[in-house]
Amino acid sequence: MARITLSRSAFFHNLTLLSEKLGGKEKLAIVLKDNAYGHGLLPMAGLAHTFGIKRAVVRTFAEAEAIKSLFDDILILNPRPPCLSDPRYTLTINALSQLHAIPSRTRVDLKIDTGMHRNGIHLEDLEEAIAQIISQRLTLSGIFTHFRGADVLSSELFWQMRQWQEVKERALRLCRHHQLPRPLFHSANSAATLRLNGYDDDYARCGIAAYGYHEMPSVFGDYDLKPVMQLYAEKITTLRLKKGERIGYGGLYRAQENLTVSTYDIGYGDGFPRYDGEGKLYLNGMQILGKVSMDSLCVKGEREEIPLIGDAKEIARSFGTISYDILVKLNPGIDRTIIH
Ligand SMILES: *Cc1c(COP(=O)(O)O)cnc(C)c1O
């Protein structure tokens, strides 16, 4: 069977690097949304817990429920009602209109739009949001934003950080005025964490770097991250093709000589990208022959097992996408094992 291994030492290496950059483990929140970027929610949550991470970030209540015994604080990015209550949960408020549905005493974080214009409350509405939080007897536990360009080579990040600075100052004034405790501020994702020195928010929300990748241009340097996941596929059959015979749907790949080929048990049904080509794609030094099928693909040779993802960025480049996209789509049903 196709299988995924998760390297504990690689994950701990990345978490150590990020915590040192931030100035301590307590400043690192691990982003576990979307099945921990395809790595597996439960194994990665367990490892993060063992490492000593206390904060997790997920997308849904279902994800939060699955890992709640492992963390002190779980930030839910898209908490669709009905709201589940737990003292460890903090619900993100992405728009003013979401506040009215939140039960009293729930902890909320306000997400402020500082320029990404994806979701978040406008700075001009911060005062109203805080007034509503007080009148609904909610607990304002944090205020945060998300950067749109931390991984691109430009001054965008610094422009957005100035907007963020203004948010923080205004929020602190409002909290003092209403005698509310100081909320926690957080803004950085992986790219901002790696890129910035002297990040002074309360914590950062890191996903991709913890799993061993970044998507920054090489001028930013090499951050010595180690990929956590390896993906292997197992051989189903081997056959000998004669010169001129063709493989797979549409018969796109034609053998240039007599050839030994094997079929392996992974395909686009497992979330592996669908290659539609004529044998020009090389992954990990192996040539993919013909189209990728739903449950299988074909490679030259007769190895019992082949490593397909050593470096998700290599695959991403071949398909015109990013490492996140390759990793996150891998089917949760593929067996995942933690190794040293
Ligand atoms: C996904 C996400 C992150 C993590 O981003 P990475 O680039 O993977 O570190 C942080 N914050 C928010 C709001 C997110 O949605």
Image (tube, rainbow, N blue to C red):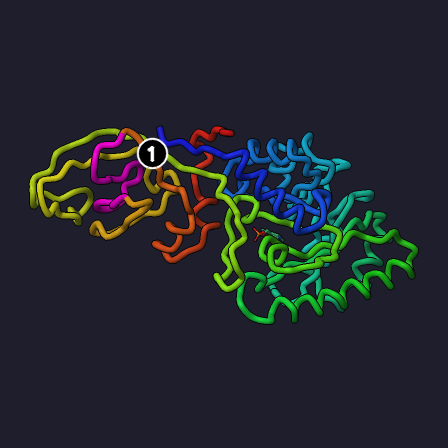
Residue neighbourhood size for the residue with mark 1, other residues' Cα within 10 Å, grouped as few (<14), some (14–19), many (≥20): many
Q: Is residue 9 visible?
A: yes
**Horizontal and vertical percent for residue 31?**
61, 45
Instruction: Name the residue at 26% across, 32% down.
Output: 303
Residue displayed at 66% across by 46% down:
19
- Please, what is the dominant secondary structure of the magenta stretch? loop
Instruction: Judge from the rendering whether residue 295 lies leftward or rightward of residue 230; answer left or right.
Output: left
Please report the bounds of the magenta region as a residue range. Answer: 286-303
Q: Nearer the viewer, residue 21 or 162?
A: 21
Left or right, 253 with reference to 218: left
Which residue is label 1 attached to? Answer: 233
The residue drawn where x is 72% and y is 40% is: 73
Left or right position of 278 against 77: left
Along the line of sight, the residue nearer the viewer: 280 or 297 = 280
> As rendered, which of 154 and 322 lies closer to the eye?
154
Where residue 65 appears, as percent x and y from the top left, is 65, 34
